[in-house]
Image: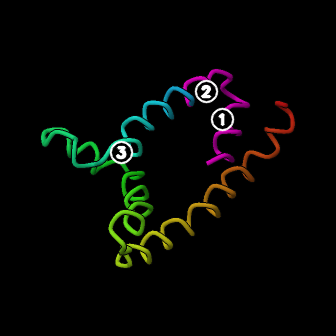
Amino acid sequence: MSLLISTWSVFFTDFLDMYQLFLQAWFFLTPIIYPREIVPERFAWVVTANPMTHFADLFRMPLYHGRSRTDDRGRRRRVGGWGLPRRWLGVARKAHELAHTL
């Protein structure tokens, strides 16, 4: 993610300010400081659609419930493992432009 953000912030100077606002909103939409169960039923789809909710649940399960979610680990590793090479190729394509812009 940092490779993508640093590349965009070179070309779009206001991107970092927008990204900080996005991160703050995302933090409060993710059930980190509040339990998932207190979200009203009509807004439960927002919490479920948030990808960070699942990572917060993975952190909470061993601490609060004494068990882990082993069924999702393989899928998350496959998805996460593909992200870095894909973004690295995107930055490598723009390397020539980055040098001249900086």
Question: Is 74 on the left-hand or right-hand side of 102?
Answer: left
Colour pattern of the rendering: rainbow
Quarter of the picture containing the C terminus is top right
Question: Which residue type does callout 1 highlight?
Answer: Trp
Question: Which residue type does callout 3 highlight?
Answer: Pro
For label 1, the residue is: 8
Residue 11, quarter of the rendered image? top right
- Residue 75: image location, x then y, percent: 42, 73
As rendered, which of 100 and 75 lies closer to the eye? 75
Question: Label 3, label 2: how many angstroms apart (C-alpha)?
Answer: 26 Å
Q: Residue furthest left?
A: 41
Task: Please tell me how crowded label 2 is: few (under 14), some (14-19), or many (20+) other residues with Cα within 10 Å.
Answer: some
Rendered position, 39 above or below 10:
below
Is the C-beta separation of discs 1 and 2 under 8 Å? yes
Q: Residue at x 51, y 34 (%)?
A: 23
Q: Between tags 3 and 2, which lies in front? A: 3
Question: Label 1, label 2: how many angstroms apart (C-alpha)?
Answer: 7 Å
Rendered position, 72 above or below 32:
below
Report the span colored magenta. 1-19
Helix or strand or loop: what does disc 1 sit on?
helix
Question: Which residue type does callout 2 highlight?
Answer: Phe
For label 3, the residue is: 31
Q: Earlier in the sequence, mark 3 or mark 2?
A: 2
Residue 22 inside the magenta-drawn segment: no
Q: Residue at x 64, y 44 (%)?
A: 4
Q: Residue at x 36, y 63 (%)?
A: 64
Question: Is 89 on the left-hand or right-hand side of 47?
Answer: right
